[in-house]
Amino acid sequence: MADFTFDGKRLKKSSGQKAGEIDRNLVRAWNGAKLGEIEGKNIRDAHGKKVIEFDGKNIKDDTGKKIATLQDIKQIIEGEGDIALVALWYFFVKK
């Protein structure tokens, strides 16, 4: 069983507690604080710095080094896989 579930908008822990959400192209914490932003295939932090890139299969850090695949993330987070899932994984699971 996955540690988190994603319904397309909200990321919840297996206990049901809300961890974060996608608000249009923004990544927000459970309390509404902006943590990052999705911009094309890039994910930026709250200060606008590129932190990861998603090409549809692989996730690379800001230097271009592969750090994970979409399949790796789907083992941790149950839900539809796209850039929103990758962004939530980065800010709530990886960190």
Image (cartoon, rainbow, N blue to C red):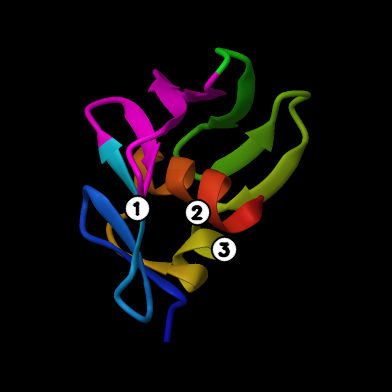
| Residue 78 pos. (x, y %) | 35, 69
Q: Residues within 10 Å of mark 3 (few under 14, many from 20)?
A: few
| Residue 21 pos. (x, y %) | 31, 45
Tell me which numbered mark, 2 or 1, is placed earlier along the sequence: 2
Q: Is residue 29 left or right of residue 55?
A: left
Please give the label number shown on residue 72.
3
Query: Predominant secondary structure in magenta?
Result: strand
Could you tell me the amino acid type at mark 2?
Leu
Q: Is residue 64 left or right of residue 3?
A: right
When the figure is inspected, residue 56 is found, relative to residue 30, above or below; the finding is above
Residue at x 50% of width, y 70% of height:
76
| Residue 12 pos. (x, y %) | 33, 65
Could you tell me the amino acid type at mark 1?
Gly
Question: Which residue in the protein does label 2 denote?
Answer: 70
- Say what secondary structure mark 3 lies in: helix
Tell me the CA gap for discs 2 and 1: 7 Å
Residue at x 60% of width, y 41% of height:
59
CB atoms of marks 2 and 1 within 8 Å? yes
Tell me the CA gap for discs 3 and 1: 11 Å
CB atoms of marks 3 and 2 within 8 Å? yes
Instruction: Inspect the magenta stretch and tell me whether residue 30 lies in it.
Output: yes
Which portion, as a residue range, is magenta? 23-46
Please give the label number shown on residue 81.
1
Q: Residues within 10 Å of mark 2 (few under 14, many from 20)?
A: some
